[in-house]
Image (spheres, rainbow, N blue to C red):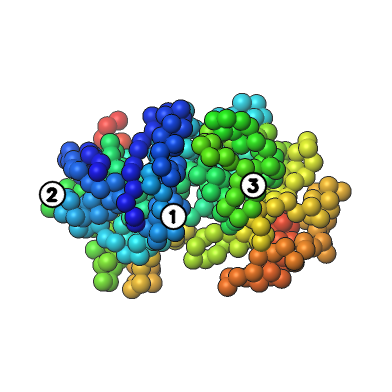
């Protein structure tokens, strides 16, 4: 057994887990954060993507013990109370989902992608960056649209803030 | 996944000590090992995590010499500004591995120690004439990669870094399997003061190899046209559901030509 202790969505959590426990199972079964999904369980589909220390990772391919000491953000940690995160809002606005199973992973991948591309995104980059996330419903079209819209909105908001600060 | 004991090593010496327990294996990013354990293809009794050892991290460029710590992730290699100047081909190669989430976890040390016959880094190490540094010795890439998933590493030996001289020209071209993103054929071409070296991954039936006929042709003239009609032997190619040996042999020359053209750009 391992004693793991990490910060999840701003909350300090700890627990005793079997060493073989995957991070996704710790999140879902020990913390009840079932927004993170297990899709393929072979690190292909990306439904389990969460942020560990600010980087998108597949939580089905990492042990909870490996994440101990880290800061984790899941889909539940994005919204600010009742206000959706801009990426969540864009997925809603542009209907970037059908069944919704892949959506938590898509949104966590999208927020990571937007953060790494402060210069802005184009369609080719978004499609290339989405190679680790599989959606079986949408054909990706509206997902790409939503991410481009969110990237533009977040870029604008950041510029506005910078102006205010100046 | 079978039951396993997890240990987090605080230093390379600590990792070496922990590695003596039972049938222990090193884990860094775990992008190959954890999935292999989930499918029970691998079942180590103990895992020794080296991913948080600071001494194993980072890219250093000093003059022409590039040194990359074993626990440096693919993302870090792909986005390192110093490396992009010294050896852009290697940074580009790292950006082609897996997907963004995999690149955030997987490490160069893990990739070369695993020596998957379709992994990208072994081709770069071989073509760059890199030296693999372990906690016990230094091993030339030519002697390091021994076959399918086989390396010169002995029990208890830990890869700590790789080091190489930045080549004058280099490029990597990869024909990717669209599902796994592994190389069906990947060719790394490097031209430097030690001549031209061409290493091929994904294609050989005994893992990564140097394509000597292509090297000889390029030594005369480092231009894609020098490879017109030059072939690698079909007999030593891998054949599977993704590509036949004939097709792979054909692709080796095609990807090598593209790599030379890219290196000359």
| Residue sitting at the far top | B62
Which mark is in front, 2 or 1? Answer: 1
Dot 2: what SS?
loop
Indicate the position of residue B160 as horizontal and vertical percent values.
53, 33
Question: On the image, numbered disc 3 is attached to which residue?
Answer: B145
Q: Mark 2 lies on which chain?
A: A
Task: Name the subunit of mark 1.
Answer: B
Locate residue B112 relative to residue B247 in the image: left or right. left
On the image, the x and y values in percent for residue B161 come to 55, 34
Q: Earlier in the sequence, mark 3 or mark 1?
A: 1
Q: Residues within 10 Å of mark 3 (few under 14, many from 20)?
A: many
Label 1 neighbour load within 10 Å: few <14, some 14-19, many 20+: some
Q: How far apart are marks 2 and 3 (CA)?
A: 53 Å
All told, the count of numbered labels is 3
- Which sits in the foreground, A105 or B147? B147
The residue wearing badge 1 is: B42
Q: Are marks 2 and 3 on the same chain?
A: no
| Alpha carbon distance from label 2 to label 1 | 43 Å
Image position of B258 (left or right of A166): right
Q: Does residue B205 appear in this view?
A: yes
Q: What residue appears at the point 54 percent right and 30 percent down from the top-left corner?
A: B135
Disc 2 target residue: A81
**Are the residues under badges 2 and 1 in a single subunit?**
no
Q: In this view, does A121 lie above or below B69?
A: below
Asked if the residue under mark 1 is in contact with the one under mark 3, i.e. CB atoms within 8 Å, the reply is: no
Q: Which of the two marks, 2 or 3, is nearer to us in this view?
A: 3
Residue B86: x and y in percent read: 63, 35
Residue placed furthest toward the right: B220
- The residue located at (75%, 43%) in the rendering is B191
Q: Residue A103 carries which label?
A: none
Q: In which quarter of the image is residue A142?
A: bottom left
Percent coordinates x, y for residue B240 in the rendering: 60, 70
């Amino acid at each position: 057994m391992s004693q793991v202790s990490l910060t999840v969505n701003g909350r300090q959590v700890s627990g005793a887990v079997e060493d073989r426990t995957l991070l996704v199972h710790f999140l879902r079964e020990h913390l009840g954060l079932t927004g993170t999904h297990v899709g393929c369980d072979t690190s292909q589909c990306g439904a389990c993507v969460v942020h560990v220390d600010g980087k998108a990772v597949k939580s089905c391919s990492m042990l909870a013990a490996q994440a101990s000491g880290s800061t984790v953000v899941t889909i539940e940690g994005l919204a600010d109370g009742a206000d959706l995160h801009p990426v969540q809002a864009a997925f809603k606005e542009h209907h970037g989902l059908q069944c919704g199973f892949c959506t938590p992973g898509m949104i966590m991948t999208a927020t990571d992608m937007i953060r790494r591309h402060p210069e802005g995104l184009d369609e080719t980059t978004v499609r290339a960056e989405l190679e680790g996330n599989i959606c079986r419903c949408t054909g990706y079209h509206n997902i790409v649209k939503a991410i481009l819209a969110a990237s533009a909105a977040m870029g604008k908001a950041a510029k506005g803030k910078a102006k205010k600060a100046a | 996944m079978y039951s396993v004991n997890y240990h987090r090593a605080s230093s390379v010496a600590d990792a070496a000590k922990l590695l003596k327990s039972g049938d222990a294996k090193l884990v860094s990013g775990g992008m190959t090992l954890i999935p292999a354990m989930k499918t029970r293809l691998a079942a180590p009794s103990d895992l020794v995590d080296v991913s948080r050892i600071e001494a194993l991290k980072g890219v250093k460029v000093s003059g022409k010499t590039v040194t990359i710590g074993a626990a440096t992730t693919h993302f870090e290699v792909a986005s390192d500004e110093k490396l992009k100047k010294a050896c852009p081909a290697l940074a580009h190669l790292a950006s082609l591995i897996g997907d963004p989430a995999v690149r955030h976890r997987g490490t160069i040390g893990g990739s070369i120690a695993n020596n998957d016959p379709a992994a990208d880094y072994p081709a770069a190490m071989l073509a760059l004439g890199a030296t693999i540094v372990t906690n016990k010795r230094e091993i030339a890439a030519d002697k390091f990669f021994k076959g399918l998933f086989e390396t010169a590493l002995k029990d208890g030996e830990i890869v700590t870094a790789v080091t190489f001289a930045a080549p004058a020209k280099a490029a990597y071209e990869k024909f990717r399997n669209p599902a796994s993103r592994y190389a069906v054929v990947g060719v790394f071409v490097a031209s430097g003061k030690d001549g031209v070296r061409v290493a091929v991954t994904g294609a050989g039936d005994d893992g990564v190899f140097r394509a000597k006929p292509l090297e000889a042709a390029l030594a005369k003239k480092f231009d894609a046209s020098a490879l017109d009609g030059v072939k690698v032997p079909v007999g030593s190619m891998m054949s599977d559901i993704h590509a036949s040996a004939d097709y792979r042999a054909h692709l080796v020359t095609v990807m090598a030509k593209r790599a030379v053209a890219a290196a000359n750009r």
